[in-house]
Amino acid sequence: MPMDPLVSRARALWQELAAAPGAAFGTPGRPEVLVSPDSALAPPSWVGVVAVGDAALITAPTDRAANSVRSALTGLTTAALTDPATVARLLPVADTLGPAVLGYLAPDALGPVGRTGASATCLAPEHAALRALLAESGPSDAGESGLADVTSPVFAVRDGTEVLAAAGYERWPRDTAHLCVLTAPDARGRGLARQVAHAATGHALAAGLLPQWRARPPASRRVARALGYREVGGQLSVRPA
């Protein structure tokens, strides 16, 4: 049976990010565990877990860490592999990042923008109003959004000189557009994130890129689903104790 095209493209991306020769996803219940100190699946010296479809790929910084991971996590479902509580019961863990859900959008699947009564304008990533939005949102929300790292134009809804919501994307390997969306704290719940994300996603599709949405908060996941993104995997990073 042919593999789902979104799953296939997503796996190709994460295999490249694993930075290990011959990196590949495992089989259900048997994740592929590789030693890769330069892996982009997790911060340096951490263990990175990415599950896409029914299989997972894990990178570890050392042979010792990889052996521990193989021993502890073999046999788990892909859902369990990205569950912090499950992993922490089986491995000595000092800290975790995530889990995050990975969503991807097929070229013909972009949903409607919805109605907000506002229109999106295009700004350069270095625009002063965007820097003000990042500062207003605080380090946690700004960092989660990734908006400071975009390489595309930024699509924004403004109220005068103030940016209420903004979205763009960072160009990743394998022709992937990693979506970055941020709404000002006092402008949330008005559909603005969906509007700017629709514009940024459309721009990525027009460039022939695969839009990727990585999210933890439920509200962010709802926006992605409304736009047509399909959740096909998850990601967890673990710092060994």
Image (cartoon, helix red, strand yellow):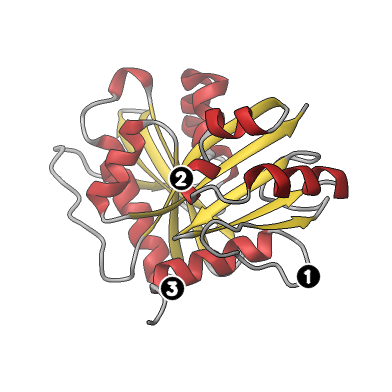
> Mark 2 to mark 3: distance in Å?
30 Å
| Residues at marks 1 and 2 touching, judged by CB atoms closer than 8 Å | no
Question: What element does badge 1 sit on?
Answer: loop
The structure residue drawn at horizontal position 77% and vertical position 64%, both measured from the top left corner, is 20
Q: Which residue is mark 2?
A: 79
| Residues at marks 2 and 3 touching, judged by CB atoms closer than 8 Å | no
The structure residue drawn at horizontal position 20% and vertical position 50%, both measured from the top left corner, is 113
Pointer 2 or 3: first along the chain: 2
x%, y% of residue 215? 44, 40
Question: Residue 127 versus residue 5: which sits nearer the camera?
Answer: 5
Where does the N terminus fall, quadrant-wise?
bottom left
Residue 78 in the image: above or below residue 26: above
Mark yes or no: residue 58 visible.
yes
Pointer 3 or 1: first along the chain: 1
Residue 219 in the image: above or below residue 11: above
| Residues at marks 3 and 1 touching, judged by CB atoms closer than 8 Å | no
Q: Which residue is mark 3?
A: 208
Which residue extends farthest right?
Answer: 63
Residue 85 in the image: above or below residue 57: above
The answer to whether residue 33 is left or right of residue 184 is right
| Circle 2: residue type | Ala
Question: Residue 131 versus residue 72: which sits nearer the camera?
Answer: 72
Question: Residue 64 versus residue 40: which sits nearer the camera?
Answer: 64
Structural crowding at the residue carrying mark 2, measured as other residues with C-alpha within 10 Å and reported as few (<14), some (14–19) or many (≥20): some
The structure residue drawn at horizontal position 54% and vertical position 28%, both measured from the top left corner, is 85
Question: What element does badge 2 sit on?
Answer: helix
| Circle 1: residue type | Pro
